[in-house]
Image (tube, coloured by chain):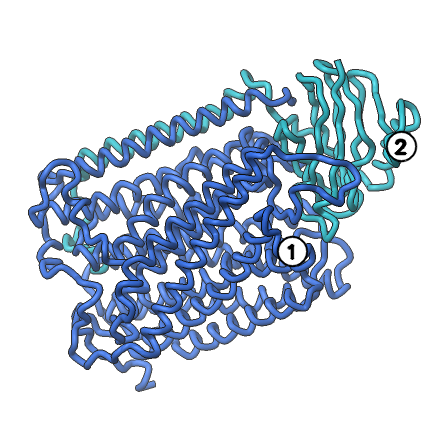
Amino acid sequence: MASSAAFRICPTTGLKVNLAAEKLIKANAVAAIVFLAIGGLFGLLVALTRWPAVHFLPADWFYLALTAHGLDVLIVWIIFFEMAVLYFASSVLLNCRLAGPRWAWAGFVLMLVGAVTTNVAVLQGQSSVMFTSYVPMMAQPPFYLGIILFAVGALIGCFVFFGTLVVAKQEKTYEGSIPLVTFGAMTAAIIAVFTIASGAIILIPTLLWSLGLVSYIDPLLYKTIWWGMGHSSQQINVSAHVAVWYAIAAMVFGAKPLSEKVSRMAFLMYILFLQIASAHHMLVEPGFSSEWKIFNTSYAMYLAVLGSMVHGMTVPGSIEAAQRSRGLTKGLFEWLRKAPWSNPAFSGMFMSLVFFGFIGGISGVVMGTEQINLIMHNTLYVPGHFHGTVVAGTTLAFMAITYLLVPLIFRRELKFRKLAQWQPYVFGVGAAGISLFMMGAGTLGVSRRHWDMTFADAQLPFDYPSAAFLMMGLNGIAAVLATLGGIMFVVIVVGSVFFGRKLGENEKPSYPEVPPSAVAVAHYGSSQSLRIPGTAMLVGVFFIAFVLYYFVNWKYLSEVWPLS
Amino acid sequence: MAITPPSERVWWKEPIAKVELVWILIAFVWGLIMFFMMIYWHGAGEQNLSNEAYKITPVRFSQRAQAMIDQYTVRQEGIYPVVHPPPGSDVYLIARLWQWWPILELEKDQTYRLHLSSMDWQHGFSLQPVNINVQVHPGYDMVVTIKPDQAGEYGVVCNEFCGIGHHNMVGKIYVVE
């Protein structure tokens, strides 16, 4: 196949870009953004309905919109974009042709058909079973079929990625070890295989059950295996967006990892321990021992948390080291103050890092503590947490790297630069607000997945405290802000990709700016000369916040009814 | 750079900076503290699940609940019987579309073995405003030993999605002196 081995030389990076891989990256990124727009719109409808003063949708439409929102953004948007990341991190970064581009296209088509099938099933109204589709609540067969097709397509994408690594090794398209970003993407792909296997194990029997061919599926068994997919799919995100953080630090600052060994070990911790966190969802279920819960919910003594805390230092640390080597050495924070805050790739990436750690990360560990889960399980605290990880963390990081992909891969000049400069802030602040206000409402007991917090039509009355209503109003406002940021993103990307000026064959994009000394920085110092006092201060603040918040929640727990 | 192969071919032999080592150590020790905190709370804390659970059919569970209701109903509130079981006894709360059945009346500072099970889909037992939340499955009888420590009127909200009437599924527990 001559066409699959055709390349162009990237004028900015000097990398050989495989044209087949480039087309696939474009297709997957575009599909991802289309589903982000659809899923985001459903999310806005959900938030407007939960805003007590607005209470926008009727109940049946609310549960339908919530099901569609969860599927489209937690699975479809994220995994389509991750396919683009996988092809970029293998073929482009390794200067290599893509292994089996036809397979990759087959995977893409399967994913698209699956996503559309499930969406249609949900929109028909008989499959409002939520993203989790807990048995014995039953959806229509196409609901499960669509997810299975999507998963098979994604699995093919993962194997194309692995195949490309093999091809690159055999054809010696790079020297030494694979880049750290590729290593991070590989971590994501390995976790993805585990995730998809779990999904297949449980969703295929569930499909047969919905067709009437299997008579019974144990709800506890379903839930245990389903979360092997449900939670692990979010661990793909973590690995992928950490890889994206490193990629942006490298592309914008020429930053070099502080230590390849440490960063790779941190990714290895993800491969080994992240998946067992599906136990987070089983902490208040019948039939599990505390030993099982404690070991699994803590990722075997928090070793995967260790991985994230390491990345939380090495990513900003590598940026600080790069900035200091460029002469920004005054005080603790000159390197950060004089960072390119108007470059959306950087501002989006840095906010993603901060929000993922402070909001998504800390809340996740606290909520995943065996006993503390009792005061948070299935309250709005849960979506508060994962909007901190998946929206303020992953989605913001993916948006940030899109600003680099548009000129480099789509070869279009970025349009609406003023808008682009503000977009990460609008979206980031909105997403952080959504997370914090939902966590606040959850702490006050408000249930997730619930149409009417006033219980107007219930047989027995109950009133949540008025502070909870305030939280939900603020959540609605934050959601509107995030939606605005989302619309800005879609307008900028779609506008640039379709109407942006085409870059000439050897033309370097002028925006977002990449500092001229980026390449030189790649060779700074060694461990002896490393000074990152600003980052040390930042992680110190993070650590204090973590410890305080952790023990405050034990205090809350100690005040509820004694249970044994 | 992170997007290129490591510049040192034998990167695994490069020394690690002290600041990184210190942070790894802090994070590791903190992980151990959080891990042992859960174990410690099983001994020292008062809020732990017993993990006592049995397989049971919905019919059998509702029979047991009905026996309790027949024996200990003290009054009626609308369609709901209000049941005042003796302290220390086995108390049954049925979760079904879309009710928590019956209304329970418990005594302050007394211990009860609360049995929870669903007749149909999954439900979420969310005791408010205390904010204790546990999952209720069909086919499983989960036993939670509770000791209400404040008198008052409490709501039981369903916090697992259970279909179109989910938001109307509210129960009640009274705690009396």
Q: Is residue A201 visible?
A: no
Q: Dot 1 surroundings within 10 Å: few (below 14), some, or many (20 or more)?
A: many
Q: What is the secondary structure assignment of the residue under circle 1?
A: helix
Q: Residues within 10 Å of mark 2 (few under 14, many from 20)?
A: some
Chain that appears blue: A
Name the residue that disc number 1 marks.
A63
- Residue A27: which quarter of the image? bottom left
Residue A437 seen in the figure: yes
List x then y, in percent, for residue B109.
70, 13
Question: Which amino acid, mark 2?
Answer: Gln
Q: Which chain is cyan?
A: B
Marks 1 and 2: in contact by CB < 8 Å?
no
- Label 2: which residue? B66
Give the side of residue A230 with respect to residue B162, left or right.
left
Left or right of residue B5, residue A374 in this image: right
Image x and y of residue A288, in percent: 63, 35
Q: The N terminus of chain A is located in which quarter? A: bottom left
The residue lying toward the viewer, choosing from A470 and A367, is A470
